[in-house]
Image: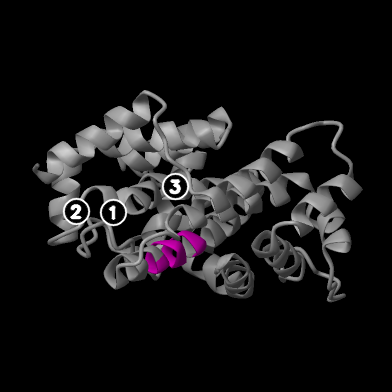
Amino acid sequence: MERREFFNQIAADAAKGGLVFPTHADVALKVQRALDDPDCSMEAASKLIMAEPLLSARVVAMANSVVYNRSGREITDVKQAVPRLGFRTVRSLATAVAVRQLSAGPTDPKLRAMAAQLWEHTAHVAALAHVIARRVTKLDPEAAMFAGIIHEVAGFYLLARAHDFPGLFDGEPGNWMAAWNGEAEALVGRAVLKTLGVPEPSMLAVESYWQGYLELPPVSLGDTLLLAEDLAPVTSPLKSSERESPADSGLDLVLGEDTLASILKESADDVGSLTASLKF
């Protein structure tokens, strides 16, 4: 079977609801759904999070990041971290754990390395999106970070299914993208995002990412995500290494009294701290 047929079959299965999630990803999804309940208390949320060690570690790390700990008072447990972050940020982290664990199954060293690079890329994009939303597009930074966390869901899901489709990731990244033909990525991605319970604004931002049109100066959540993608120092291993628009191309963009370059320089600590919190 040719690679294009593999992608089309996976996309068709996804569209019909035939998604296969690893058990450990399901645990994080249960936490995420519980946090959607308006009757869920801080204490109940903390207990659920503590039952998932990876999520617990990320929640505490994020709460101690520069962005969420302006006072410099470090905390060491989930019960203190949840109120500091709020349910929205904790829910984003639960989604991050589920997405990252999608690709935890491959035993092939090449696929594991690809999964690690894809998550490092994701962490950079999410952190940059948070800062760009806060400093540039003046949008909700939490929504922007969440969009960054989920923007590569199709790639993570394909890595999770690679063992069922031998040869799926053979060859060069550019060839994979040609086989996807654009629409296959969107079909798989939409199905995974639906399973993750992603809200419509975030869905629309990721749709903009799939379409790949960045408006300058950036205005929308989709623009915020695309700009963060372009500026990320670590590229996706599933895409061609030749970027259509190099990251440096927009750094001299004038935004009010500042330039994008100066804003990113001033926010370097925030970006670095958030990125570190999301790496796992």
The reply to whether the magenta stretch includes residue 122 is: yes
- Of marks 1 and 3, which one's residue comes earlier in the chain? 3
Viewed as shown, does residue 3 lie left or right of 38? left
Report, in whole angstroms, how far the alpha carbon at label 1 lies from the one at label 3: 23 Å
Q: Nearer the viewer, residue 266 or 177?
A: 177
Along the line of sight, the residue nearer the viewer: 270 or 260: 270
Crowd around label 3: few <14 · some 14–19 · many ≥20 (10 Å)? many
* Three-letter code for the amino acid on which mark 1 is drawn: His
Q: Are marks 1 and 2 in contact (CB under 8 Å)?
A: yes
Q: Nearer the viewer, residue 132 or 101?
A: 101
Single out the residue that lies furthest toward the top.
Answer: 16
Q: Which amino acid, by three-letter code, is at mark 3?
A: His
Q: Which numbered disc covers residue 203? A: none
Q: Secondary structure at mark 3?
A: loop
Q: Which mark is residue 166?
A: 2
Residue 136 appears in view: no
- Residue located at (70% from left, 58% from top): 52
Q: Are marks 1 and 3 in contact (CB under 8 Å)?
A: no
Q: Nearer the viewer, mark 1 or mark 3?
A: 1
Measured Cα–Cα span from mark 1 to mark 2: 6 Å
The residue beneath circle 1 is 163
Magenta-tinted stretch: 116-123
Residue 18 image point, x, y percent = 39, 30
Residue where numbered disc 3 is placed? 151
Instruction: Give the SS element for disc 1.
Output: helix
